[in-house]
Amino acid sequence: MTQNAPAEPAALKVAVLGAGTVGTEVLRLLSQQGTELTQRIGAPLEVIGVAVRDADRDRGEHVPAELLTTDATALVREADLVVELMGGIEPARSLLLEAMAQGASVVTANKALLAQEGAALYEAADVHGVDLYFEAAVAGAIPLVRPVRESLAGDRIQRVLGIVNGTTNFILDAMSRTGASFEDALATAQELGYAEADPTADVEGHDAAAKASILASLAFHSRVRLADVHCEGITQVRAQDIAAAARMGRTIKLLSIVERIPGEAGERISARVYPALIPQNHPLASVSEAYNAVFIEADAAGSLMFYGQGAGGSPTASAVLGDLVSAARARVFGGVGPRESRYAELGLIPLDELRSAFYISLTVQDRPGVLAEIATTLSGHGISISTIHQELLEEGEAISADGDHDPRGGGDLPQAHIGITTHRALESAMTASLDVFSATSTVLAIDSVLRIEGE
Amino acid sequence: MTQNAPAEPAALKVAVLGAGTVGTEVLRLLSQQGTELTQRIGAPLEVIGVAVRDADRDRGEHVPAELLTTDATALVREADLVVELMGGIEPARSLLLEAMAQGASVVTANKALLAQEGAALYEAADVHGVDLYFEAAVAGAIPLVRPVRESLAGDRIQRVLGIVNGTTNFILDAMSRTGASFEDALATAQELGYAEADPTADVEGHDAAAKASILASLAFHSRVRLADVHCEGITQVRAQDIAAAARMGRTIKLLSIVERIPGEAGERISARVYPALIPQNHPLASVSEAYNAVFIEADAAGSLMFYGQGAGGSPTASAVLGDLVSAARARVFGGVGPRESRYAELGLIPLDELRSAFYISLTVQDRPGVLAEIATTLSGHGISISTIHQELLEEGEAISADGDHDPRGGGDLPQAHIGITTHRALESAMTASLDVFSATSTVLAIDSVLRIEGE
C-alpha cells in the first residue's frame, strides 16, 4: 500500500455499454479475475450495469439478467468508469461525453468514433480531468496505443507501417498461398467467419483508414480525421498481381501508412491506406492469416514491430481490461493518463505531392515500338523505370481485367501484358502518365496500379 | 491543461547517474526535445547534475562541464527524478534507495541490479510512494515492460519466449548464414562491436538470465531472482548443430523462457535460458542480427510479439526517456505507476521436473546393434524418439567435438554421428540417459544436447 491509498478503498463502479462478443468476454474476465484485478488496482471493481438495446435479445451467456438495462444514460451517470463497446457514432459519442462530463473515466474500443470524433473526446477528457483509453480501437490485443503514447513519449516517430485489418490480411494471404482470386478468397473468409456478409468496411479499406487516422493523431500529436486519410481497398488486387509480386520477391499487403514528410514549407503528415508490394524479407511480409502487425520507425528507438491478434472477443477484451486497470488505478491513487489535446497541428500533405515507387500492369498491343512509347510517356513525366517484365498471357485471356471484353476493341489484335516497376516518382506524375495511357490506342487496358513500400 | 495542473508548474529536477553512451544520448535528447517534452509532461525538466566517477575522464560530447559532479549522493538528494545509467550493483543500489527514500522517482536501465535486488527496489518504491521505471533494462528500445505491467494487467500471461541478448543472436545468426564456428562468429561480432572483449556475460547467458528473472517477476507477479534462473550459454553450439537443425526445418536461438507450469501441487514457475531449436516458421526464427524479440502467450490476448533493437545508446535512451516522461507526469498530475510488491509468490519448478523435447547428437561406434542399444536406453527412461538421422562425418573428423581426440580411444574404430530428436520427456530422464551414454563404450562422445521449443 502506498501512502496515499485509503486503507479500505470503496469499490469502483463500472458501467459496460454493449453486451456483444467483446462485452460478454470483458464481463467474463472481470468475474474470473476479480481477486487479481482488485490486487492490481488497489480496489475492487463492481459492475453496476450493462446497457443493451434490447434486454431480452442482447444477453450473452455471462451477463446476469439483473445487470441489464436499456437506459444507458442513467447508467453512465452512476459510474466511476465507463466501458463503451457498442460501436458506431451515436449514441456512443453522447454517452461517452456525458460520462466524462459527470467525472467518469472511459475506455472504448470504438475506432469509428475515435476516427471521426477523436478531437472532441480528447478535449472532453482534458477539460474534465478524466482518462480516455482506447487500446482496443487500433490493433485489438496488440499493445500499440500505450507504447506510442507512453513508451515513445521521449522519442520522435517518423513513420508507422501497419497491417491493421485482419480480414483483408486473411484474404491477401489466402490469395498468395493458393493463387485464388479476390472473390474466391473473400468467399472463403466469409465461410470461416473472417469476413462479414457485407465486407465493405474491411475490403474497401475503411476500417484500416479509421485506424490510420487514430495512429497518425497519436504518433504526430496532430489532428488527423478519417476524411484526411487517402484510402484504397483490395477489391482490385488480382491473382496475377500477387503472382507477379512473388516473381519479384515481393508480397502484397494492405498497409496503413502514416509518416512525417519534410519539405520546404516545413514538416507535413501523410496518412494513407492502400495495397502495396513489400519485400518478402520485410518483417511485415510474414504476417499471415488474420494477424495484425505494426512497424514503427522512430529517431532514437529505430525499428520496432508489434504483432498479434487484431480482432476477436478475447483479444479485444484483454486490451479493454488493461485500459480499465490503468483508469481504475488513477481513481485509487490519483493522477491522469496521457493527454492528446495539445496538438502540434502539422499540416497534411495531399497524395499528389507524395513520391512513391509503383508497380503497373498494362495490356498493350503486341507490336514493335510499344515499349518505347510507354517508356517515353513515363520518362516525359519524370518517372524512371526500374524493371519491365513481359507477363504471361493465360489461355483465352484476350479480355481486360474486369472480365469485360476490352472496350477499345483490342480483341482481335495480338496482345501482351507487361509489368513495370518504377523508382520513386511524384503521384501526380503517375496520374498524368496513366491519363495518357488511357487515351492511347497502344495501351488496351490499365490492369493494375500498385505502390511499392518498405524498401 | 487539466484542472489539477498548476498554471505555471516549476521545473522538475533531474539527476543523471552515469555519462556513458546511454547517459550522453539521454542528455542529448533531453536538450533536443526540450519543448516537446515540456508539453507532454506539463512542466519543464531541468538536469541539475550528471554524476560520474571522474569528472575529467567521463565527459561525453553532450555533457556540459558545469553539470558534472562526483558526489552522486548529494546530487540524488536534490532531485525529483533520478535516472540511473551507471550499471553494476553498487553504488547504483544505494543511490536508488537513497533517492526513493528522499521522495524521488527513479528510472533505471540496470538489469543486473533489478535481477539481484529487484524485490528491495520494488518495496522501496511502494513504501515511499514513488515510481520505479525500468523499460530499458529488459529489451532496450522494445516497449515490453509497460505492455506486460499495464496493457496485459487484466490478462493472464502463460508463457514468454524471448530473444533478449543481441550479441548471442548476432553470433547464432552469423553461424546460421555462413556456416562459421562459434569462435569465428564471436570474433566477427567482436570486430563489428556486437560483442565485448570479454564476452562472458553475453555468451554464457548471464545477461539473458538477468532479463528472464525480471520478465518472470513481472509476468507472474512473483519474486524470481537471477539465481532461480537455469542458465546455459551458446559456447557449446556447433556449426554442425545449426546445419542439422536447418536440415530439420529449424534454427537455433538463445531463448529466455518463463512460464507457468500447472501441477498437482498447484501452479509453479519455470525460468530458464538455453539455446534451443525452433521451427523456421516461428515468428522468433526470423529475428536476425542483433535484434531482440519477445513472444508472449496470454489467455485472452493470444500470441503477441514485440521486436526491435535491444541495446545501443539511442534505443536504450528512447526507452529511458519514455519512462522519464511517465514518472515526470506523475509528479505534475499526481498518481503512481504500476507496483510490483504485491506478490503471488508462486513456487519455482526445478529444471529436473520439466518436460522438454530434445535434440541430441552422439558419436557412436559404427557397428550393428548400436542404434538399438541407444533406443533401448532412451525408452528405458521413458523417452520416446521422434526422429533419428545418421549425420555426415566430415573428412578427417574422427575426433570429438571439442577438438581433442576422443578420450575413450575410439580413434581407430569406424565411427558414425547420429542425431536424435525426442518427444517431450522429463529432464531428469534425459540426464539419466546421458549418464548411461557416458558410461558405455558404444557411445564415443555426446556432442550436443539441445532442447526443441516453440512447436
Image (cartoon, coloured by chain):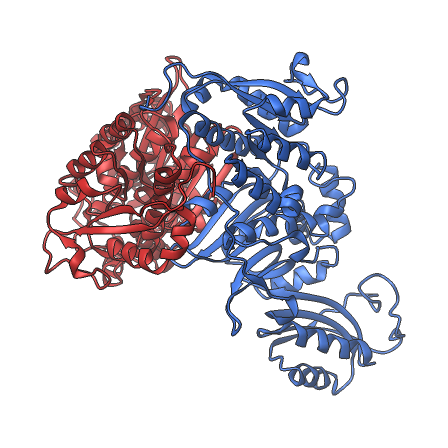
Chain colours: A red, B blue
The answer to whether B375 appears left or right of A273 in the picture is: right
Q: Position of residue A252 (x, y in %)?
A: 37, 46
Residue at screen point 68% across, 55% down: B227
Q: Does B365 appear above or below A369?
A: below
The answer to whether A26 appears left or right of B314 in the picture is: left
Quadrant of res A270: top left
Q: Nearer the viewer, residue A409 or A42?
A: A42
Q: Position of residue B61 (x, y in %)?
A: 66, 18
Q: Position of residue A115 (x, y in %)?
A: 25, 35
Q: Does A400 appear above or below B273?
A: above
The answer to whether B215 appears left or right of A341 in the picture is: right
Quadrant in which the N terminus of chain B is drawn: top left
Q: Does B259 appear above or below B144?
A: below
Residue A49 in view of the camera? yes
Residue at screen point 33% across, 57% down: A29
Q: Does B102 appear above or below A39?
A: above
The answer to whether B342 appears left or right of A313 in the picture is: right
Q: Nearer the viewer, residue A197 or A278?
A: A197
Quadrant of res A33: bottom left
Q: Nearer the viewer, residue A452 or A374?
A: A452
Q: Nearer the viewer, residue B406 or B28?
A: B28
Q: Position of residue A172 (x, y in %)?
A: 33, 51
Q: Residue furthest front?
A: A7
